[in-house]
Image: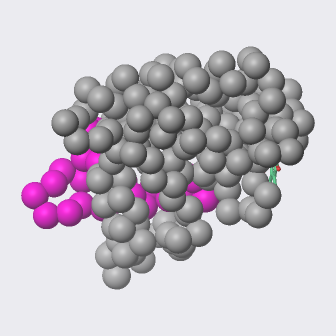
Amino acid sequence: MSALKLLVIPGSLRSGSLNAKLAAVAAHELSVAGADVTRASLSDFPLPIYDGDLQAKSGVPKNAVNLKRMIRAHHGVLIVTPEYNSSVPALVKNTIDWVSRVQDPHEVRGEVFHERVFAIAAASGGRLGGTRALAALRLILSACHATVIPNQLALSFAEHAYDDMDHLKHPADIEALQALVRQLIDLSQRMM
Ligand SMILES: Cc1cc2nc3c(=O)[nH]c(=O)nc-3n(C[C@H](O)[C@H](O)[C@H](O)COP(=O)(O)O)c2cc1C
C-alpha cells in the first residue's frame, strides 16, 4: 500500500511563529508515526482578499488552484492556526474562502474538503491556547463539509511551551499532540 500522505499548514507567516513551531513539531510526530508529511507555507500562496467581482473578472487566482491541488494530493490535512481577536486570522479564513471556490474539471466545487480528513491545532500566549480560534476553524471547515477529527490541540502559554530545541517540553502538551496525531492518522487511513 502507498504511504499515507499528510499536509501540515501553519496559519501564520511571522518569523518565529509559535504556530509554525507547533506545525514543525506535529509534522515530525506524524512522520515518526509513518506518514509521508509535507509542510506548506501560506507565504508560497499569496492571495488577494476574496472579492466576487475579482473572481468573475479573472477567475480564481492560480495560487488558490495550486494550494487546492496540493491539498488534493494528500489524504489528510493539519491546520495550525493563531487566534486573532477570538477567531481565526484573516489569512486562514481568506485562504479557505478562495480554495473553496476552486472547481477543477470533472469536480464538484469544494470537493477537496469533502474527501479529506482535517485536524486542527492552535498555539497562543494566553491561557486558552487559541480555543476560540479552533471553534471558529472547526465551524468553517465543517461548513465546507470537511471531516474534522474530534481531537484538537490548544497550546496555552506557548512562549513557554518549547525547549531550546523547539520541542514541546510539558508532558500534557506532548500527550495531547500524540493523541491528535494518532487520530489524524487513523481517520486519514480510511481515505486511502
Ligand atoms: C491582531 C491580533 C489579535 C490577537 N488576538 C488574540 C486572541 O484573541 N487570543 C489569543 O490568545 N491571542 C491573541 N493574539 C496573540 C497571538 O496569539 C500571538 O501573537 C501569537 O503569537 C500569534 O501566532 P504566531 O506566533 O503563530 O504568529 C492576537 C494577536 C494579534 C496580532
**Of 106 and 172, the residue lying toward us:** 172
Identify the residue at image location x=59%, y=69%: 43
The residue depicted at 51 percent of the width and 58 percent of the height is: 40
Q: Is residue 60 left or right of residue 105?
A: right
- Image vertical order of residue 145 relative to residue 20, above or below: above
**Left or right of 179 on screen, residue 101:** left
Q: Is residue 52 above or below residue 191?
A: below
Q: Is residue 11 magenta?
A: no
- Residue 114: x and y in percent read 28, 38
Q: Quadrant of the N terminus?
A: top left
Query: Is residue 34 visible in this depiction of the protein?
Result: yes
* Residue 22 image point, x, y percent: 68, 42
* Colour theme: one colour
Query: Where does residue 73 sit, x and y in percent of width and height?
Result: 29, 53
Residue 77 to residue 51: above or below: above
Q: Quadrant of the C terminus?
A: top left
Question: Could you say which is closer to the camera, residue 125 or residue 146?
Answer: 125
Depicted 53 relative to depicted 19: above or below: below
The region drawn magenta spans 91-115
Residue visible at 40% across and 39% down?
A: 35
